[in-house]
Amino acid sequence: WVDTSLVHDNIWLVLVFHGVDGIGWEPRTGAELEEYFSYMKERESDLWIATFADVSKYIRERKNTKVSSSVQDDQIVVKVSPELAPEVYDVPITLKTYVPEAWNNAVLYQQNREEGQQQLEIQEDGQSTYVLYDVLAEEGEWILAEQKEN
């Protein structure tokens, strides 16, 4: 099932166990579960492993957060406006923003807070170049800029 999740986009794998080591209905052994979770751990860079509660929050946040972007000078300003209470809905959401093809690299930081810059990998799809990044769904503006070489 893990391999199926890896080769398909936007697929959920929900694991439910009703027993372990002889206790519960159709229990699995601790060794079987350790092997299975180790298999997932080895592939964690390609999986999002989260609780059902966090996945539910993420889906609600994505559906109830307005995101807009505008180009200002040589930067892209991304405005995030949530409709849900950020103190409850606190799972970072992933955003995809297209950037100029001339950019060789990109950084992300919150408006007026350059000290916490995050370097982003420029990627390509069939349309153009883009970056993926995670932000908390809270009111604010994020800046995407080409990182200037020193």
Image (spheres, helix red, strand yellow):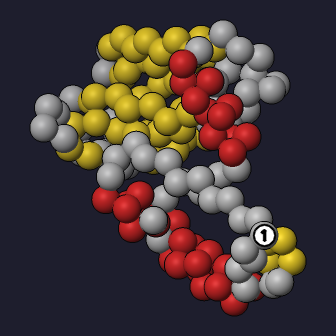
- Which residue is nearer to you in this view: 150 or 82? 82
> Residue most toward the left?
126
Say which quarter of the image contains residue 1.
Answer: bottom left
Say which quarter of the image contains residue 84.
Answer: top right
From the viewer's perspective, is 21 left or right of 134? right
Judge whether 42 appears above or below 7 on screen: below
Image location (x, y in percent) of residue 88: 80, 26
Task: Say what secondary structure mark 1 lies in.
Answer: loop
- Which residue is nearer to you in this view: 66 or 109? 66
Rendered residue at 37%/21% (across/down): 76
Tell me the crowding category of disc 1: few under 14, some 14 to 19, or many 20 or more residues within 10 angstroms, Cα based. Answer: few
Image location (x, y in percent) of residue 91: 67, 36
Q: Is residue 29 visible?
A: yes
Image location (x, y in percent) of residue 102: 16, 35
Rendered residue at 47%/71% (across/down): 43
Judge whether 29 appears above or below 133 on screen: below
- Which residue is nearer to you in this view: 144 or 131? 131
> Residue most toward the right?
23
Judge whether 21 appears above or below 93 on screen: below
Say which quarter of the image contains residue 68.
Answer: top left
Image location (x, y in percent) of residue 9: 34, 47
From the viewer's perspective, is 86 left or right of 12? right
Q: Mark 1 points at which residue?
A: 25
